[in-house]
Image: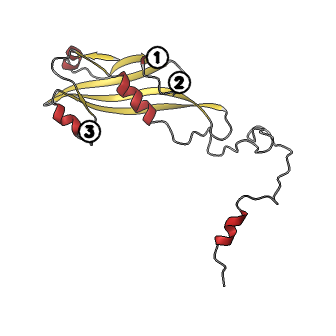
Amino acid sequence: MKIFRSELSSEFKNRLFDMTAGDLPDYGSPFKHDLIQCVLSSTKVQFGFHLSGSLSAIHLFECDRCLDPFSIADQIQVKLWLTPNQGLTDQDELEMIYFPDSMDEIELAGTFADLLYLSEPMKKLCADSCKGLCSQCGINLNNSNCLCKSDDSVNPWENLRSFIPKQV
């Protein structure tokens, strides 16, 4: 998504930008809908421009336990500073992007793709109560019960009991 310097200088407020998932670098994160919306406001600041707003997308995931597809609507707050001063971009506490005065436009698709990717959950679960798959027959335990008998005599963790101190 490109934004022109002239647009930034006009200090727009709550402007809607539509992007498609195809406009973003492919990080292997599919989206339920191809449309990704971005509502931004631009403000001139002493060292460049401040962009703030939100990025909205619906991620499509596969549950880590039951492998069923599910989606999560995500709205990410965006706070970016665009500056021609390359020395300011080394600050870790702010999202500073180098935008030299010689450039008339800036491409933000990569930055927005990073924000969307970083917002993904580490453990992708369709529900906190997901029961997962039967380890013997593979049936989804959220949808039905299996008739497999669990073999309690074979426990791979049994040897760890020897490390538990005996109570006197």
Circle 2: element type: loop
How far is disc 1 from disc 2 in space, using C-alphas?
10 Å
Which residue corresponds to mark 2? 31
Give the amino acid at mark 2.
Answer: Phe
Determine which of the numbered discs, if any, sits on residue 22 in the image. Answer: 1
Residue that appears at 85% across and 46% down: 148
Residue that appears at 38% across and 23% down: 38
Q: Is residue 142 found left or right of 12 in the rendered image?
A: right
Circle 3: element type: loop
Give the amino acid at mark 3.
Answer: Leu
Give the amino acid at mark 1.
Answer: Gly
Q: Earlier in the sequence, mark 3 or mark 1?
A: 1
Q: Quadrant of the N terminus?
A: top left
How far is disc 3 from disc 1 in space, using C-alphas?
28 Å
The single residue placed furthest to the bottom in the displayed view is 168
Q: Earlier in the sequence, mark 3 or mark 2?
A: 2
Picture quadrant where residue 163 is located:
bottom right
